[in-house]
Image: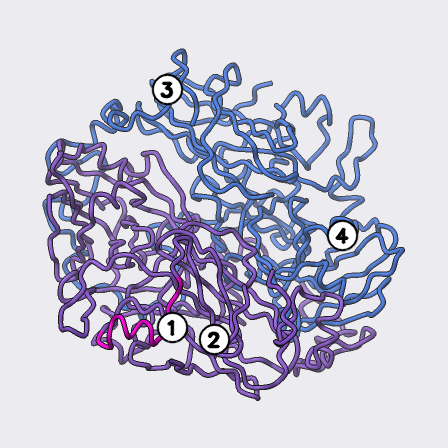
Chain colours: A purple, B blue
Amino acid sequence: MATKNPELPVETPLNRRNFLKGSAALAGGVAAKAVPTMALAGNPENLPPNVPSWSQGLGDGVDITPYGMPSEFEQKVVRRTVPWLTATPESSVSFTPLADVYGIITPNGLHFCRHHGGVAGINSHDHRLVIHGLVDRELIFTMHEVKRMPSVSRIHFLECAANGGMEWRGAQLEAVQFTHGMISCCEWTGVKLSTLLDECGIKPKAKWLLAEGADASGMTRSIPMDKALDDCMVVYAQNGEMLRPEQGYPLRLFVPGWEGNMSIKWLRRIEVGDQPWHTREETSKYTDLMPTGKARQFTWFQECNSVITSPSMEKPINGKGFVEIQGLSWTGQGKIKQVDVSVDGGKNWHPAQIDGPVFDKALTRFRLPWKWDGKAALLQSRAIDETGYVQPNFSELRALRGEWSIYHNNSVHTWKVNTGGDVENVQLS
Amino acid sequence: MATKNPELPVETPLNRRNFLKGSAALAGGVAAKAVPTMALAGNPENLPPNVPSWSQGLGDGVDITPYGMPSEFEQKVVRRTVPWLTATPESSVSFTPLADVYGIITPNGLHFCRHHGGVAGINSHDHRLVIHGLVDRELIFTMHEVKRMPSVSRIHFLECAANGGMEWRGAQLEAVQFTHGMISCCEWTGVKLSTLLDECGIKPKAKWLLAEGADASGMTRSIPMDKALDDCMVVYAQNGEMLRPEQGYPLRLFVPGWEGNMSIKWLRRIEVGDQPWHTREETSKYTDLMPTGKARQFTWFQECNSVITSPSMEKPINGKGFVEIQGLSWTGQGKIKQVDVSVDGGKNWHPAQIDGPVFDKALTRFRLPWKWDGKAALLQSRAIDETGYVQPNFSELRALRGEWSIYHNNSVHTWKVNTGGDVENVQLS
């Protein structure tokens, strides 16, 4: 719970008995006595004291939906693409609608996608994982064999290294879905990579792995052995069910906290070696061009980051009064320790509430009660992780890394609330 | 981690380097050298060293699936119904396929359903929640107003009081989906019920609530005020997205740890009073007929329970060797403290591993490594919660409650593994 600061329009701790009464907008909608509220234009026949149409007849039975889907009234909550971003949709991105997700679990249907050769349509019965190279026994596993092994389940985020990439030079996209939507968080289930490697027996000079996907791009990345033996998994399930095709069905590598592209989807081959492979995806791509003209390579972990998802461009404020500022934070280096929120462009910071579970390398939701006075405001969030690392602002990041990067943009973003309640993506230094 | 017991065929701690080599079945499938394994009949063209068909051309682009769905090869993993169980599908149940879910999060598409008048097809724009009765201010809330209030997210199970009901007299259904599949677990997001009640102002003599659904059955239950103010929520989201229609879209009450039917779906009305209402659903239904002919009423919380989901009737053992016994445990009284597993019908018990997060009133997955010798075995699990309560066996429960109950069957179940590896639901005393 944030501490009260009388100089700022932040009311904390929340005065429950008065927060709605104190809000002009909500007071208009919350009428005394049980009479219909017309704050939103509804269908009068369905409003109290009338009995709504859906209460007047039987609805669908349990036999209608063996596998359930969202309400028809939520059809706008979908992953979206940016057609101009890449040459073809088979090598592109679809973004999670962060302003319309709740809690820390991303539903499987809305998990962001990044493909390099489209979605491989694999029959799990025919899929095989080969492990070879500097091992005592080169082995081929069926899915049945992988699933028979000792299993683990872990809640972790997955983030594309290019998340926020379009903002490096200040694109200022007008949707949090596009500024930050290349991140999602699921409960992943599979086998520890160390269990599989133990079964093959790693030779003493083995220091690296090559992981290869069965998609048309033959996506490949080198993984250092220390990480492989630490917390990497070979996963077959997400959020309680088998992986979705676009997430690597039936098997993907999962490299917690590191660039999403290293969590190779449709995993078909692991080669054990003594040095990195310097594949296309770690030379021409997924490196960071510095002002000197040299490139940073093997920038593996996703830095501590955060974003306010409401209010946001998709979630304008509908009138003065109580507003819960909400957002998501994460770090590839462990757990989130604290998130600070500013409503004045970083002049003053207030510690946000973190009341959900805080997992290692997982999305962590923060909340801050705020009373909006109808004036323009500059909202920012700044996350701090358990290593003590503080999320940088835009100018700090550019001073360090220049303007040529695409990847690893974890700078503080600013949402400007205008007097009408609408929100803009603006660039502060 | 369980302790090693040399008298039993349980190998713990797991000897990683040898568990697969020691397994005849898996040794057959895991071939030395990178040559195809034919343990499962696959399509040879797709097996190594051949390059599989799905690697030879572009797959679907990111624009194909704005909202993702499971693989076509997982179409058998669905909720199932029991047509003879009720007169109509509008007042019936569909069961979560517990043997095919992973971790502790149940995907929204597979959350069990129990309706009393079918699924109300509600437009969230027109939905209203009325709070009236012994309050200072009778109020009507739009969904916009509810969603603007301070929010919380919690991971909790939801279980029908009748889960296991068909087993009271020993039906011995041949699928864990039907014996225990009226339970699921999600991250629920909404507003604390206490926040809403504070806004209305509860009068001093208010001791009970009536919650009413907007479905055709007008589902109603009485909730004691202590529970309402403790951990109840009015939720609009599950697992990161808006509630599914069959889970009460756009708003449901959520009463953690208590009978699922009290978590009123399509919540339209809360009346505050000084005594319970004794509705149909707490008199003729959801009471427990005792041997004396009297009925237990208001048997609210779901007792500590557990079930082995693999091996199970749906998950036979495919050959001797290493097997991970897995299952789910839960209690409506707090957290799971321990789960014991027996492979000899309860003569000897071994503490299972609980390596996932253990949440209050949430599914908790347990695992026990086991080496199956090919002989018949009797698998049981027995959960213990943080109050010290131990899940009873069938005869203990019947001695206490007789044979006439439908609800609150939390007895230890027994899966018999036959020599062929197939599994039966058998009744031990």
Q: Mark 2 lies on which chain?
A: A
Identify the secondary structure beneath mark 1: loop
Q: Quadrant of residue A391?
A: bottom left
Q: Is residue A398 magenta?
A: yes
In this rendering, which labeled residue sits more in front, label 1 or label 4?
Answer: 1
Contact, mark 1 vs mark 2 (Cβ under 8 Å): yes
| Mark 1 and mark 2 on one chain | yes
Q: Name the residue under label 3.
A: B419
Q: Name the residue under label 4.
A: B221
Looking at this view, is B365 or B216 the one in front?
B365
Contact, mark 3 vs mark 2 (Cβ under 8 Å): no
Segment tinted magenta in the rendering: A390-404
Q: Is residue B314 visible?
A: yes
Question: CA gap, disc 1 to disc 3?
Answer: 65 Å
Question: CA gap, disc 3 to disc 4?
Answer: 48 Å
Residue at x-position 65% and y-position 44%? B257
Q: Is residue B313 visible?
A: no
Residue A338 coordinates in the image, percent (x, y): 49, 59
Q: Mark 3 lies on which chain?
A: B
Q: Name the residue under label 2.
A: A346
Q: Does the magenta stretch include residue A385?
A: no
For the N terminus of chain B, which image quadrant?
A: top left
Identify the secondary structure beneath mark 2: loop
Identify the secondary structure beneath mark 4: strand
Residue A209 coordinates in the image, percent (x, y): 17, 46
Identify the secondary structure beneath mark 3: loop
